[in-house]
Amino acid sequence: MNPKVGWQAIFETGPVVVSAHSSQEAQALTSVNTFMEPSVQVKWDKLQDFVSAETSVVSTDPTAVAEAKEIKSENINLSNRYWEATPPQIAVPVASALSKFILNPNLTLTPFLKSLQQIAQSYWSTVKK
């Protein structure tokens, strides 16, 4: 742990997706766009006590309001959860390898970590910058 990093909060997001090859793509996009309208999201927040992905909608949930206030006042760094922050081409094989490591703790750590690094390097070498 490095105290210089400061307080961290890891958060999870849930994507809203529409298949690009769906025969009903236009209807799905209309549905998603309607759902994300602030007037609809205000109702969603009140019904679900759930923070809206639409940033113009201020949550009415007391817990969410308190958390947001603390994050701001304490200058807490927000980090996406591993699955949201990592391309699936890395996340899936690394998660599989980690499971194998957990089940076989006799594996040597350094070569194992290097194999994970190789997965990431292999993927990032194919991505245009």
Image (cartoon, helix red, strand yellow):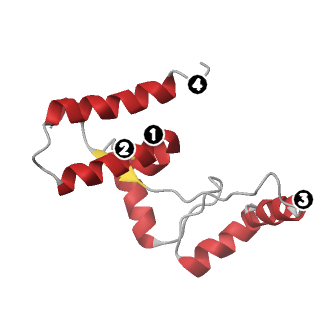
Amino acid of disc 1? Ile
Q: Which quadrant of the figure contains the C terminus?
A: top right
Find residue 32 and report its horizontal and vertical position in percent: 77, 62
- The residue carrying mark 4 is 127
Q: Total of numbered circles in the picture?
A: 4
Count residues near mark 2 (Cα–Cα under 10 Å), then give few for <14, some for 14-19, many for 20+: some
Horizontal side of 92 relative to 99 (left or right) equals: right
Find residue 109 and report its horizontal and vertical position in percent: 15, 36
Q: In whole angstroms, how far apart are the C-alphas of marks 4 and 3? A: 29 Å
Disc nearest the viewer among 3 and 2: 2
Residue at 69 percent of width and 57 percent of height: 17
Amino acid of disc 2? Val
| Residue 94: numbered disc | 2
Q: Which quadrant of the figure contains the N terminus?
A: top left
| Contact (Cβ within 8 Å) of mark 4 with mark 2 | no
| Residue 26: numbered disc | 3
Residue at 50 percent of width and 29 percent of height: 123
- The residue carrying mark 1 is 90
Q: Earlier in the sequence, mark 3 or mark 1?
A: 3
| Contact (Cβ within 8 Å) of mark 2 with mark 1 | yes
Horizontal side of 18 relative to 114 (left or right) equals: right
Q: Earlier in the sequence, mark 4 or mark 2?
A: 2
Q: In whole angstroms, how far apart are the C-alphas of marks 3 and 2? A: 36 Å
Horizontal side of 32 relative to 95 (left or right) equals: right
